[in-house]
Amino acid sequence: MWGGLYAGLFAGWLLLVGTVQRLELIAGLCAAAIGLGVVEVVRAQGLFRFRVEWLWLRLIWRPLARVVPEFLLLLLALVRRPRGTFRQLDFPVGGERATDAGRRAFAVLAGSLAPNRLVVDLDPETGKALVHDLVPGAGSADLP
């Protein structure tokens, strides 16, 4: 497990810097080691409790399909300069189980994939999600 996580962090570093120069390789190895240490500290404190259901991945196609059309919409918005809006969407947040925490994390990540929308907050008391749409009316009316 540690080797896979270390390799993933190192690969993420290389993708972000976009070069394989010797100095960047060394910096990436150090950054991956620091990241691995941080993951272990967070896991040891019990703050890393979430579980992702693999069936949720079948819902990811909708936000991914919206990436290119909404990017083009935002290019047009640079000319028209519309005012963004905040909206509240129904989203039953769930409880404190690891599956509920994973569902919330998945909803925030998948809901923010398309460039027009950003999930700002999930309110457990009201069962609502606060989202910001850069171009009003262009986003979907629900979260995955």
Image (tube, helix red, strand yellow):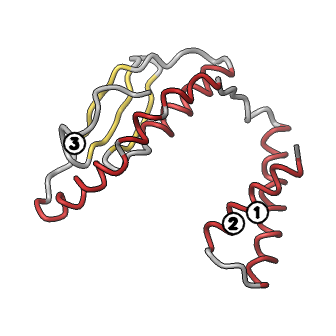
Q: Position of residue 34 (x, y in %)?
A: 81, 61
| Residue displayed at 69% across by 66% down | 13
Q: Secondary structure at mark 3?
A: strand
Disc 1 target residue: 10
Which mark is first along the chain, 1 or 3?
A: 1
Discs 2/3, front: 2
Res 13 label: 2
Secondary structure of the residue carrying tag 1 is helix
How far from the left and from the top, in percent, is residue 136? Answer: 18, 42
Q: Is the residue 71 above or below the residue 138 in the image?
A: below
Foreground residue, 31 or 8?
A: 8
* Residue 144 higher or lower than 134, as above or below: above
Q: Quadrant of the C terminus?
A: top left
Residue at position x 81%, y 38% in the image: 43
Mark 1, Cα crowd under 10 Å, few <14 / some 14-19 / many 20+, is many
Q: Is residue 133 left or right of residue 95?
A: left
Q: Callout 2, which amino acid?
A: Trp
**Residue at (34% x, 25% y) in the render:** 142
Residue drawn at the location 19% of the way across and 63% of the way down: 78
Q: CA distance from mark 2 to mark 3?
A: 34 Å
Give the Cα distance between marks 3 and 1. 38 Å
Q: Which residue is mark 3?
A: 85
Query: What is the secondary structure assignment of the residue under circle 2?
Result: helix
Which sits in the foreground, 56 or 27?
Answer: 56
Check the image and name the residue furthest to the left: 80
The foreground one among 93 and 7 is 7
Q: Residues within 10 Å of mark 3 (few under 14, many from 20)?
A: few
The front one of 121 and 139 is 139
| Amino acid marked by disc 3 | Thr
